[in-house]
C-alpha cells in the first residue's frame, strides 16, 4: 500500500515538473491550448452543418448524436491527458531512453506516464466540458439517478479503453521501434468516428466494436439506456465491463518489456 | 534554380526509400476512407435528396482525398524544419548561399510528391474496383481530367506555400506546436478536408470558396467528380493562382523580416 502511495506521489511530482516546464513557453502554451480547442470545435461544427440537411441518422437525432459526441470526446480527452506519455513512446524507445527508465527502482509505466503530461489538452477538455454541458442540456433526457450513474460509468470505462489503446500503441514500439500509423485508426479514428453511435455503421461494425475493441460498450449500448430506447439495466454496467480491456493491454505491455532490446546510442 | 531542383531530387529519391512506412500509410488511409464512406452512406440512407452531391461523387471525392492525402494534409509538416529552428541548427542553413524560402519550398514539394506517388496507386486501384456507389468513378470527362491534374498541382503548391509560411512563423514563436495546431484545424475545416464544401449552407459556402483555404484540395477533387460548372471552374482556377501568388509573396516577405532578426537557439 505504501508503495502505491509513493507511486502516486511520484506521478504528481512528474506532473508538476511538466507543468512548470511548459509554462516557460507561455505564448506557445496558450496557442496550443487554443489549437486543441479548435480541433474538436471544428469536429462539432461538422456535425452541426451536416444535421442542417437532415433531421436524424439511423434513428438518432441531432441532440442525441451531440450527447454521444460529447461523452466520447470527454472520455478521449481524459485518457489523453493522463496517458499521453505513451504517445511519444517511440521516441523514448528509439533514443534508448527506456534503458534509463528500466534501471530506476520505480514502476516503468508510472515513469512513462509522467514523461509527458499535456496540460495543453486542457483546451480539448474545456471544449469537451462545454460540449458535455450543451449536449446534456439539449438531449431532452429525463435524468434520474441511474442515468447519471451510467454517464459516470461511461466516462470511467471510456477512459480505461482509450488508456488501454494508448498502452498497446506504445507496447508495439518494442517490436517495431517506429510507432505504427495504422494504430491511429483505433485512437484518433475512434474519436473521429465515435461521434456517431456505433449502430450507425451497421451490424458488422457493431459486432466488432462489442467483442474486439469495446467502443460500443462505452458509447452505443449505455446510450440506448440513457435515451430510453431500452430499459434493460444491464446496459448500464457495460461500460464498466469495458475496463477489462486494460488487462490484455497491460499483459501485452509486460510482454513487450520482456522482449525489449535496447536501441539508440 | 538548379540548386532548388537538386534539393527537390535529393528529397524525392530519399523519401521513395520509405516503402514500409508507405505501406502502413496505405492501410491506414484505406481504413479511414472506408469509415468516412460508411458515415456518408448512413446519411444518404437517412435522406438521399438532402445532399448537393450524389453518394457516388462523394465517394469519389473521399477516395481521391485519401489517395492524395500526402499532397494536401496540412498536419504533415516537416518536423525537421521546426527542429532546426528550435535547436539552433538553422545557423548552418543560414550560412549556405541559398534562399531559405526556396529551399524549404522545393523540399516540401518533393516530400509530399514522393509520398503521394508511393501511396496513391494502391488506393486508387482498389477503390476503382469497389462496387458502385462506394468506389471511385471515372472522371466527369477528358477536359475535367486534364483540369484535375493541373489544379492538383496548383493545390499542392498552395498547400506548400502555406506550410512554409508556418515554418517561418516558428521563428517568432519558437515552439511551433500551437501554431501548427491552429493552422491545421483551420485548413481542415475551410479546405473541405472535414466535409466537402458543397455540404455547407449556401451562403457560408460562397464565402468559404473565396478564402485561400479553398484553393487547396477543394478545387481538384470537385473538378474530378464534375460538381462544378464551367464558370465555377474558371473562377476556382483563377482564385487558386491569385492566392498562390499572394501567399508566396507574403511568405517571402516574412522570411526576409525573420532573417533580419534571427535568434539562434540552443548551444
Image (cartoon, coloured by chain):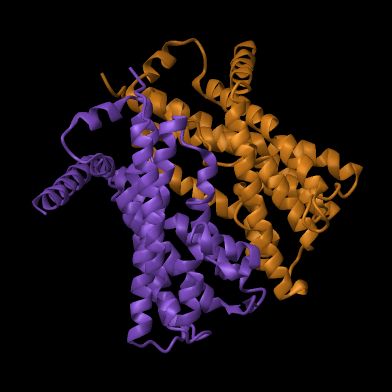
Q: Is residue A70 above or below residue A64?
A: above
Q: Is residue B107 above or below residue B148?
A: above
The quadrant holding residue A175 is top left
Residue A86 versus residue B64: which sits nearer the camera?
Answer: A86
Q: Is residue A204 above or below residue A252?
A: below
Q: Quadrant of the N terminus of chain A?
A: bottom left
List x then y, in percent, for residue A74. Answer: 39, 64
- Residue at 32 percent of width and 86 percent of height: A145
- Residue at 63 percent of width and 21 percent of height: B12
List x then y, in percent, for residue A100. Answer: 23, 27
Q: Can you see residue A249?
A: yes
Residue B108 versus residue B44: which sits nearer the camera?
Answer: B44
Q: Colour of chain A?
A: purple
Q: Is residue B17 above or below residue B217?
A: above
**Chain colored orange:** B
Q: Can you see residue B196?
A: no
Amino acid at each position: 500500500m505504501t508503495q502505491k502511495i509513493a507511486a502516486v506521489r511520484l506521478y504528481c511530482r512528474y506532473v508538476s515538473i511538466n507543468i512548470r516546464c511548459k509554462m516557460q513557453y507561455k505564448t506557445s502554451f496558450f496557442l496550443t491550448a487554443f489549437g486543441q480547442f479548435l480541433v474538436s470545435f471544428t469536429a462539432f461544427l461538422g456535425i452541426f452543418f451536416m444535421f442542417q440537411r437532415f433531421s436524424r441518422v439511423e434513428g438518432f437525432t441531432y441532440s442525441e448524436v451531440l450527447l454521444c459526441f460529447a461523452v466520447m470526446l470527454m472520455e478521449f480527452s481524459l485518457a489523453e491527458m493522463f496517458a499521453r506519455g505513451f504517445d511519444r513512446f517511440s521516441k523514448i524507445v528509439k533514443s534508448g531512453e527506456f534503458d534509463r527508465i528500466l534501471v530506476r527502482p520505480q514502476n516503468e509505466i508510472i515513469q512513462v506516464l509522467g514523461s509527458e503530461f499535456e496540460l495543453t489538452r486542457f483546451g480539448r477538455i474545456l471544449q469537451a466540458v462545454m460540449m458535455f454541458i450543451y449536449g446534456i442540456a439539449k438531449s431532452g433526457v429525463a435524468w434520474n439517478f441511474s442515468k447519471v450513474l451510467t454517464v459516470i460509468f461511461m466516462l470511467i470505462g471510456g477512459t480505461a479503453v482509450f488508456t488501454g489503446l494508448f498502452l498497446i500503441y506504445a507496447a508495439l514500439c518494442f517490436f517495431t521501434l517506429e510507432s505504427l500509423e495504422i494504430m491511429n485508426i483505433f485512437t484518433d479514428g475512434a474519436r473521429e468516428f465515435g461521434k456517431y453511435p456505433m449502430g450507425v455503421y451497421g451490424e458488422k461494425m457493431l459486432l466488432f466494436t462489442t467483442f474486439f475493441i469495446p467502443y460500443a460498450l462505452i458509447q452505443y449500448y449505455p446510450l440506448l439506456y440513457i435515451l430510453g430506447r431500452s430499459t434493460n439495466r444491464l446496459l448500464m454496467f457495460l461500460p464498466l465491463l469495458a475496463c477489462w480491456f486494460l488487462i490484455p493491454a497491460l499483459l501485452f505491455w509486460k510482454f513487450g518489456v520482456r522482449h525489449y532490446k535496447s536501441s539508440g546510442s | 534554380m538548379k540548386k532548388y531542383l537538386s534539393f527537390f531530387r535529393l528529397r524525392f529519391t530519399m523519401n521513395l526509400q520509405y516503402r514500409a512506412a508507405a505501406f502502413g500509410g496505405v492501410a491506414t488511409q484505406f481504413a479511414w476512407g472506408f469509415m468516412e464512406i460508411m458515415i456518408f452512406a448512413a446519411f444518404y440512407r437517412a435522406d438521399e435528396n438532402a445532399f448537393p452531391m450524389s453518394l457516388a461523387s462523394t465517394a469519389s471525392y473521399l477516395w481521391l482525398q485519401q489517395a492524395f492525402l500526402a499532397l494536401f494534409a496540412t498536419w504533415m509538416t516537416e518536423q525537421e524544419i521546426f527542429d532546426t529552428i528550435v535547436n539552433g541548427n538553422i545557423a548552418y542553413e543560414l550560412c549556405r548561399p541559398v534562399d531559405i524560402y526556396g529551399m524549404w519550398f522545393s523540399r516540401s514539394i518533393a516530400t509530399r510528391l514522393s509520398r503521394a506517388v508511393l501511396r496513391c496507386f494502391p488506393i486508387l486501384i482498389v477503390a476503382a474496383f469497389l462496387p458502385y456507389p462506394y468506389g471511385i468513378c471515372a472522371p466527369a470527362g477528358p477536359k475535367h481530367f486534364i483540369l484535375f491534374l493541373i489544379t492538383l498541382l496548383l493545390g499542392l503548391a498552395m498547400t506548400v506555400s502555406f506550410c512554409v509560411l508556418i515554418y517561418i512563423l516558428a521563428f517568432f514563436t519558437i515552439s511551433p506546436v500551437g501554431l501548427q495546431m491552429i493552422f491545421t484545424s483551420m485548413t481542415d475545416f475551410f479546405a473541405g478536408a472535414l466535409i466537402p464544401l458543397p455540404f455547407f449552407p449556401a451562403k457560408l459556402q460562397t464565402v468559404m470558396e473565396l478564402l485561400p483555404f479553398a484553393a487547396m484540395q477543394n478545387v481538384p477533387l470537385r473538378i474530378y467528380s464534375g460538381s462544378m460548372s464551367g464558370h465555377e471552374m474558371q473562377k476556382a482556377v483563377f482564385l487558386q493562382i491569385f492566392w498562390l501568388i499572394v501567399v508566396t509573396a507574403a511568405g517571402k516577405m516574412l522570411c526576409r523580416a525573420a532573417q533580419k532578426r534571427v535568434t539562434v537557439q540552443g548551444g
